[in-house]
Amino acid sequence: MSETVSIPTLSGDTAFDAYVARPAGAPKAAILVIQEIFGVNAGIRRKCDKWAEAGYLAVAPDLFWRIEPGIELDPDIEPQMARAMELFGQYNPDDGVKDIEATMHWIRRAAGVPKIGCVGYCLGGKLAYMTAARTDVNASVGYYGVMIDQMLGEAKALAHPLMLHIPTADHFVGPEAQQAMHDTLDTHPKITLHDYPGLDHGFATEAGTRRDEAGAQLADQRTADFFNQHL
């Protein structure tokens, strides 16, 4: 079962929408799904539905609500990809972490699910890393997170497990950035990094030209095993 819910901001003076997919029975935990730069589109909703099928409460907040609420974009359509890049340039990731924390409050207080994992893609991968460092989320996973190499100092604050999926041919995250991530994060006791040789950004999208089937299945299985272990 799926629905759209309204989640109060941390300040309580307004609210934003989130897509919620519920499991058939009592949820074993919650998965907070963090969007790419394309909004809570069909692919993100499908990821939520899959987590619900696996027994989790899945929630995907609309993180672009301050700029253009409810926007859904397709990366395979060039004008929509261009619009997504504009939104990325306008977006403040610090606001994103606050909205993710507000979503966590809703999950624990309104939905009554105490344990939460988060999984994010692209911009969401960066936000998953920031969420791991700045909140009490129980476990986090980031797929092809951008600009993580510019905030490696935040890893010192990590108290819960984090997994990062890194495609080695990512045209948004180059070899130097990937190496910096490995140099700093490989020795962290709470962090696991997985490289995907030859794969590019977006390889685990649910549909479209960016998807690599074998790579997506491998990364998604690792993510499922990770959440089974830590939630």
Image (tube, rainbow, N blue to C red):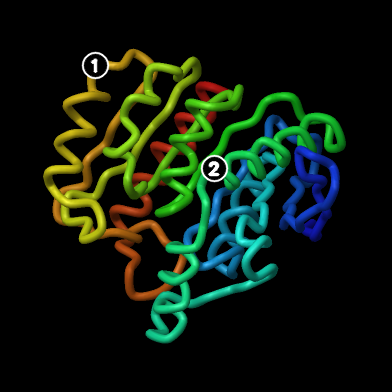
Q: How busy is the neighbourhood of tag 2: few (under 14 within 10 Å), some, or many (20 plus)?
A: few
Q: How busy is the neighbourhood of tag 1: few (under 14 within 10 Å), some, or many (20 plus)?
A: few
Q: Which residue is mark 1?
A: 187
Q: Nearer the viewer, residue 7 or 48?
A: 7
Q: Nearer the viewer, residue 149 or 165?
A: 149
Q: Nearer the viewer, residue 162 or 149?
A: 149
Q: How many marks?
A: 2
Q: Are marks 2 and 1 in contact (CB under 8 Å)?
A: no
Residue 231 placed where, x, y %? 59, 24
Disc number placed over residue 162 in the picture, else none: none
Q: Residue at x 42, y 86 (%)?
A: 79
Relative to 15, 169 lies left or right: left
Which amino acid, mark 1?
A: Thr
Using the rendered view, name the quadrant where residue 141 is placed. Answer: top left
Using the rendered view, name the quadrant where residue 104 is placed. Answer: top right
Residue 83 placed where, x, y %? 46, 77
Disc with the residue nearer the chain's start (2 vs 1): 2
Which amino acid, mark 2?
A: Asp
Q: CA distance from mark 2 to mark 1?
A: 26 Å
Please tell me whether mark 2 or mark 1 is closer to you in this view: 2
Residue 36 placed where, x, y %? 48, 59
* Element carrying mark 1: loop
Q: Which residue is mark 2?
A: 94
Residue 136 placed where, x, y %? 61, 22
Q: Quadrant of the N terminus?
A: bottom right
Q: Residue at x 79, y 38 (%)?
A: 106
